[in-house]
Image (cartoon, helix red, strand yellow):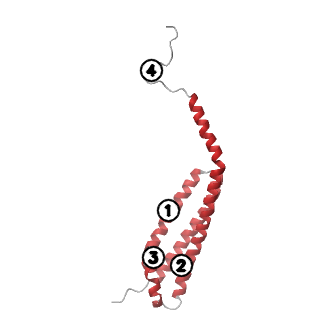
């Protein structure tokens, strides 16, 4: 019994969908830089949630095309003329978009680290100020403890 024919058209469609998702993630990564620079933590959280959703969709596509990729090298000769080039072009497009995304994410990580270093003194000063103010806050007395010293006795 011969193996089922390779569904290269489905693989090409999955590659196109992956490329689109990675391009969307790349756009989000670029927007992320502006949010990092402005310190918009709520915006960053929303953006990360969107990226996670896109990653979940990419993961589903990846799982769906895993069987094709597993047998690709051994069975590529079975494809009709021109199909091999189309499959390779689709895969190369995904790889290129993913490469740009990884590069952008590295740049964003470096920017986030620069912002962390830049804001560290501000954050440390804020934490120190809170501790200093805390030293002056009157805390309620424990039940049974006198709040005031009776100086008349």
Of discs 2 and 4, which sits in the foreground? 4
Q: Is residue 30 above or below residue 84?
A: above
Q: Which mark is residue 91?
A: 2
As helix, strand or loop, the secondary structure at mark 1 comes to: helix
Q: Which mark is residue 65?
A: 3
As helix, strand or loop, the secondary structure at mark 3 comes to: helix
Q: Quadrant of residue 2?
A: bottom left
Of discs 4 and 1, which sits in the foreground? 4
Q: CA distance from mark 4 to mark 1?
A: 55 Å
Quadrant containing the N terminus is bottom left
The residue beneath circle 1 is: 53
Whichever of callouts 2 and 3 sits on the residue coming sooner in the sequence is 3
Q: CA distance from mark 3 to mark 1?
A: 19 Å
Residue 126: give x, y in percent of width and height: 62, 40
Residue 59: give x, y in percent of width and height: 47, 68
Q: Which mark is residue 145?
A: 4
Whichever of callouts 1 and 2 sits on the residue coming sooner in the sequence is 1
Of discs 1 and 2, which sits in the foreground? 2
């Amino acid at each position: 019994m011969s193996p089922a024919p390779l569904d290269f058209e489905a693989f090409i469609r999955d590659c196109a969908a992956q490329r689109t998702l990675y391009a969307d993630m790349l756009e989000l990564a670029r927007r992320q830089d502006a949010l990092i620079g402005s310190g918009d933590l709520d915006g960053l959280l929303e953006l990360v949630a969107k990226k996670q959703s896109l990653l979940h969709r990419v993961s589903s596509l990846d799982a769906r095309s895993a069987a094709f990729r597993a047998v690709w090298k051994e069975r590529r000769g079975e494809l009709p003329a021109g199909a091999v080039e189309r499959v390779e072009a689709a895969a190369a497009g995904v790889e290129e978009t993913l490469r740009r995304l990884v590069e952008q994410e590295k740049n964003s990580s470096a920017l986030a680290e620069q912002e962390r270093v830049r804001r560290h003194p501000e954050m440390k000063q804020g934490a120190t100020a809170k501790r200093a103010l805390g030293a002056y806050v009157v805390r309620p007395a424990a039940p049974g403890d006198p709040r005031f010293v009776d100086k008349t006795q």
